[in-house]
Amino acid sequence: MKVMLDQETIEVEHPSLAAALAAGVALAESRGRTIIEVLVDGSPVRGEDLDNVSNDPLPDAEVRMLSAEPVELVRQSLFDAAEALESACDDHTEIANRFQAGADHGQAMELLGSTLSVWQGVQDVLARGYALLDMDPDAIELPAELAQGRQVSQLLVELGEHLREVRRSLEDQDYASLADTIGYELEPLARIWSQVLKLAAEGCV
C-alpha cells in the first residue's frame, strides 16, 4: 500500500484506509495543518465514507492526502462563500418574481434549490471554519451601518428563521409567502452576509 501526504510518502502500521488516514491526520496536525482531501486510487473519499473508513486490507491501493494550513483554508472558504452569495443576490429577486407571477414553478424551484445550497454553505463555513480555528464568530467586528448593532450569532439566528419559513412555505405550497420571504427578507440578507463573510475572512489570523 502506498500512502502519501502532499508529496511525502509515509509509513503506516496496516495496509488499510483507516490506518492511512490516522497516520496522515497525525502527521498533518503535528505540522499545524489539516487534511482537506483524501484520494484512493485517484477517487475522492467524502462524506459518510470518510467518517466511517474501513480497516479492511488494501495492499495494492494508493492513498493520497492533501493538507492545508487551517487559517488559510478557512479564509479562502469564507471568501468563496462570499463570492457565491454575491453571485446569488439577483437570483433572489428572480425567484420571487417567478413565484409572484405564477410562472413555471419548475424553473423557479430549480433556481431556489441552487440558492438554498449557497445559504447552506454560508452556515457550514462559519460553523465548521470557526470550530476548526477554535474562534468565536461574535469576535468579528461588524460596522454599525452593516449589521445595525447585531452580532454574527444574531444574524445566524435571523437567517435560520427565514430559511425555516422558506421550508414551511414550500411544504404548504404557500408561494405568495415564499416569494415575500425570498424577495424581502433573504435578498437584503444576502447583501449583508456577503460583506460579513469578507470581514470574517479578513479577520482570520
Image (spheres, grey):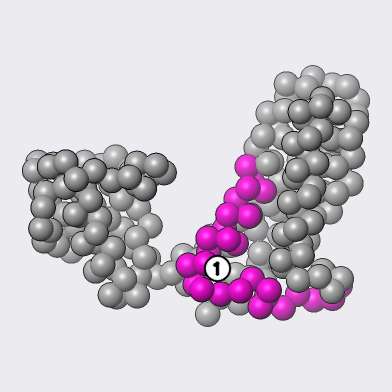
Horizontally, residue 204 falls left or right of residue 189, namely: left
Q: Residue at x 65, y 37 (%)?
A: 114
Residue 92's place in the image compared with 24, above or below, is: above
Residue 109's place in the image compared with 126, above or below, is: above
Horizontally, residue 180 falls left or right of residue 154, namely: right
Q: Position of residue 18 (x, y in %)?
A: 23, 51
Q: Position of residue 79 (x, y in %)?
A: 59, 62
Magenta segment: does it hold 125?
yes
Q: For residue 151, which quarter of the picture?
A: bottom right
- Is residue 112 visible in the rendered image? The answer is yes
**Which segment is the magenta one?**
117-145
Q: Position of residue 63 (x, y in %)?
A: 20, 49
Q: Residue at x 58, y 61 (%)?
A: 127
Magenta span: chief secondary structure: helix
- Is residue 62 visible in the rendered image? The answer is no
Amino acid at dot 1: Tyr
Residue picked out by circle 1: 130
Residue 52's place in the image compared with 83, above or below, is: above
Horizontally, residue 13 falls left or right of residue 172, namely: left
Helix, strand or loop at label 1? It is: helix
Q: Position of residue 87 (x, y in %)?
A: 69, 48
Q: For residue 112, which quarter of the picture?
A: top right
Q: Residue at x 84, y 54 (%)?
A: 188
Q: Residue at x 85, y 42 (%)?
A: 181
